[in-house]
Image (cartoon, rainbow, N blue to C red):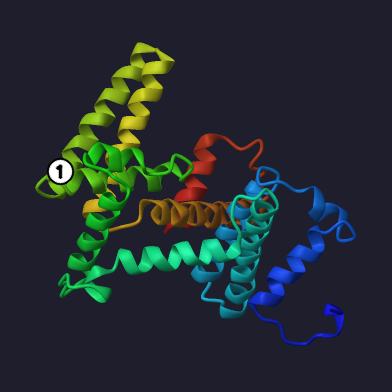
Amino acid sequence: MDFSKKENFNFDDLVKIMKFLRAPDGCPWDRVQTHESIRSNFIEETYEVIEAIDNKDNELLKEELGDVLLQVVFHSEMAEEDGAFDINDVVNDICKKLVVRHPHVFGDVKADNSDEALKSWDNVKMATKSQKKQSEAMLSVSRALPSLMRAAKIQQKAAKVGFDWDDVSGALDKTEEELGELRAAVIGGDQAEQCEELGDLLFSVVNVSRFLKLDSEKALYDACDKFTGRFTQLENLAESRNIDIRTATLEQLDSLWEEVKK
């Protein structure tokens, strides 16, 4: 088929195009790729989807979802060439998973609200993965996740069996305790201990965000944007006053920073 003359495409066309690109007379670059060589592409495309969502840009979201879908088809095609599975197996498995994990929709389990539905999902998930201990559920959390996100998921699983503070005050007290231990480690000068205590502090901060029903990853993302925006204003303010920030004193920079914050 001459795809260059086609105006409207569907999912089957995408699969066929991917096969053509990987064929001996296809694209030299596509032919030599492996799961490992395009691993980071998947991560990059996923974050671009998130950015489109944050910007509420539907046109960009449509484009970036297409890029993610391409990654799914790309990996599936390589797996089919290896005799492992194909795209239909991927679709079949996710459909089966959706049916099995929604017994409150497709079965006789009752779930009257979102929390009950989520509990039902988690129960089925543990059963289908043969997880009898909550620690097994924790160990199943992907180590490839961003650490703030991984921490939140692990804490959620601990909370499901009652290993949790009664309210946010306990999490805040623990954060202050961990900050004190980090201060002591800094004074002690042992870098390994400092790293451990810093990790404990970050973990406790994520716990606070969980109690507040906030996404710690999103909170830090927004904080980065806020800092960058303020620093840009600081540079512009310094430039308007003929101050070179590269040679300015810390006191000058702090003064400019406070002006920007106001």
Q: Secondary structure at mark 1?
A: loop
Residue 199: x %, y % from top left:
36, 31
Taking the spot 61% from the left edge, 54% from the top edge, the residue there is 42
Taking the spot 20% from the left edge, 60% from the top edge, the residue there is 119
Q: Looking at this view, is 189 or 13 the one in front?
A: 13
The quarter of the displayed image where residue 181 is located: top left
Q: Looking at this view, is 157 or 48 the one in front?
A: 157
**Tag 1 residue:** 164
Taking the spot 22% from the left edge, 72% from the top edge, the residue there is 104
Residue 206: x %, y % from top left:
31, 45
Assign the C terminus to one quadrant of the image: bottom left
Q: Specify few, some or many for label 1: CA neighbours under 10 Å numbering under 14, 14-19, or 20 or more.
A: some
Looking at the picture, does residue 42 appear above or below residue 50?
Answer: above
Looking at the picture, does residue 49 appear above or below residue 80?
Answer: below
Residue 61: x %, y % from top left:
58, 73
**Side (left or right) of 154 relative to 108:** right
